[in-house]
Image (cartoon, grey):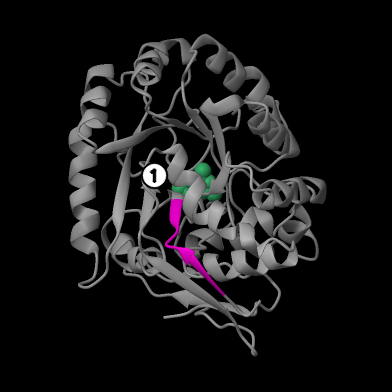
Amino acid sequence: MTSITLRRPDDMHLHLRDGAMLEAVLPESARHFARAIVMPNLVPPVVTAAQAAAYRDRILAALPEGMAFEPLMTLYLTETTDPEDVAAAAAGGLVRAVKLYPAGATTNSQSGVRDFDRVCGVLERMAAIGLPLCVHGEVTDPAVDIFDREAVFIDRVLDPVRRATPGLRVVLEHVTTAEGVAYVQEGGDTLAGTITTHHLILNRNHILAGGIRPHDYCLPVAKRETHRLALRAAAVSGDPRFFLGTDSAPHPDPLKEHACGCAGCFTATNTMALLAHVFEEEGALGRLEGFTSLNGAAFYRLAPNEGRIALERTGEPARWPEKITTGAGPVTVFNPGFPVYWQVKD
Ligand code: DOR
Ligand code: ZN
């Protein structure tokens, strides 16, 4: 196949940040994606409907003339989140999901949840109205090895929360393990999982063998090769429970190339080309549209986008900028470490 046309894709997990960083990274997503589920882990976090409305307005104000993009807003779940505020924001269509960060799990998660008993009222309300809970699925217990934190979270937290809240619709975000894949596959129609582009490409050797590569470090951290293969199999399977959420997460280079570097891979710029490469490798180009443009929309009860995007196979390796310039400093674009012979047709 030398070209493929897809419904315009949706990124069901994206970090757009704010201010100067937002201005620089938004066009990188809007160039290819029609919509994105926008993460609320700003400083301070997007906790209330009023904050989500103001953040949506800042995103739309930062969108360059002539670009179309619909931010799908989320609220950051805290132990004091008001179920009424959540329900009102969802009823008006402002908010499409609530995000659960276990406190301390990742970037700007200090205001997240420590005691899950304190959020059961909000979760019950969300189950009643069908509003999805997006979950960062890692325990923060320092006694648990970082490579086990997703699997332990499923047993200790996610499964008990789902059993205690029948009907709660959940997206297990950025699945990184075979255990996560299996849990989503067995979860029935109230559970889905997003998969990032970089977790289809990286295993932990890429981060650590032959030198430490800070731009490949994200959370949940990439696991061993068997897990990467399980993620690939799930992504290309056609199972509607799995869809793209890039978790594209920009940090300025000085904060990545640091003694205690930030977590996040910036993949907005080259995600679609990389996915065409991965799906072609798996002999599954015909299933790419489901993964990027249909399955996520269906789970979020949205119509698929009307627009189209075309990808073409190239004779020479595709090129993209090594870094993008932002008012907050340079941001390195994810480097897969191999040549890619696909690009989005402009
Ligand atoms: O790698 C990550 N970066 N994982 C997250 O969960 C958060 C994100 C960020 O905001 O930088
Ligand atoms: Zn994220």
Does residue 102 appear in the picture of this structure? yes
Front residue of 332/63: it is 63
Report x, y in % for residue 283.
74, 63
Region in magenta: 4-11
On the image, numbered disc 1 is attached to which residue? 39
* Residue that lies at the very extreme toward the bottom in this rendered image: 315
| Residue behind label 1 places its C-beta within 8 angstroms of ligand 2 | yes
- Left or right, 190 with reference to 33: right
**Residue under the image location 43 percent in, 45 percent down:** 297
Report x, y in % for residue 100.
45, 30
Does residue 264 appear in the picture of this structure? no
Front residue of 64/310: it is 310
- Left or right, 158 with reference to 346: right
**Residue under the image location 69 percent in, 48 percent down:** 237
Report x, y in % for residue 291.
56, 52
Q: Residues within 10 Å of mark 1 (few under 14, many from 20)?
A: many
The reply to whether the magenta stretch includes residue 7 is yes
**Residue under the image location 67 percent in, 20 percent down:** 155
Q: Amino acid at mark 1?
A: Met
- Left or right, 214 with reference to 268: right
* SS assignment for the magenta stretch, majority: strand
**Helix, strand or loop at disc 1?**
loop
Above or below, 22 relative to 179: below
The N terminus, quarter of image: bottom right
**Residue under the image location 36 percent in, 21 percent down:** 126
